[in-house]
Amino acid sequence: MTVKRVELMVRATCGSCDRVARQITPVVAAAGSRLELVDVDCDPDLAAEYGDRVPVVVIDGEEFACWEVDDADLAAELVE
């Protein structure tokens, strides 16, 4: 099984970002991966790309989900 890189694009002032991070952390850990929080406001390119769409889950550089994440879908994606 290949360990995938899982990033969550967030903003410091985003309550939904905190909620999604708490929600998916155990799912990511169960797949043997680690969740990396990336504050889009620290990088102008990321802020321009993700802007108002945070939280955004990115797996191995590809956008997987925006705003809401289905735990079962995420788990399945991480074991493929």
Image: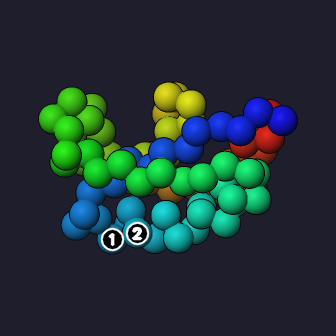
Q: Amino acid at mark 1?
A: Gly
Residue 71 in which image quadrant: bottom right
Q: Is residue 28 left or right of residue 68?
A: right
Q: Amino acid at mark 2?
A: Asp
Q: Secondary structure at mark 1?
A: helix
Instruction: Kindly report the distance in space between the C-alpha atoms of the residues bearing marks 2 and 1.
Output: 5 Å
Would you place residue 57 above or below residue 23 in this image? above
Q: Position of residue 72 (x, y in %)?
A: 74, 54
Residue 14 in which image quadrant: bottom left
Are dots 2 and 1 in contact, CB under 8 Å?
yes
Quarter the N terminus occupies: top right
Q: Residue at x 50, y 39 (%)?
A: 58
Instruction: Specify whether residue 35 is in view.
Output: yes
Would you place residue 29 above or below residue 18 in this image? above
Q: Label 2 belongs to which residue?
A: 18
Would you place residue 64 above or below residue 54 in this image? above
* Residue 15 marker: 1
Q: Residue at x 26, y 35 (%)?
A: 46
Q: Residue at x 41, y 54 (%)?
A: 37
Q: Residue at x 33, y 71 (%)?
A: 15
Q: Secondary structure at mark 2?
A: helix
Q: Position of residue 23 (x, y in %)?
A: 57, 68
- Mark 2 nearby-residue class (10 Å; few <14, some 14–19, many ≥20): some
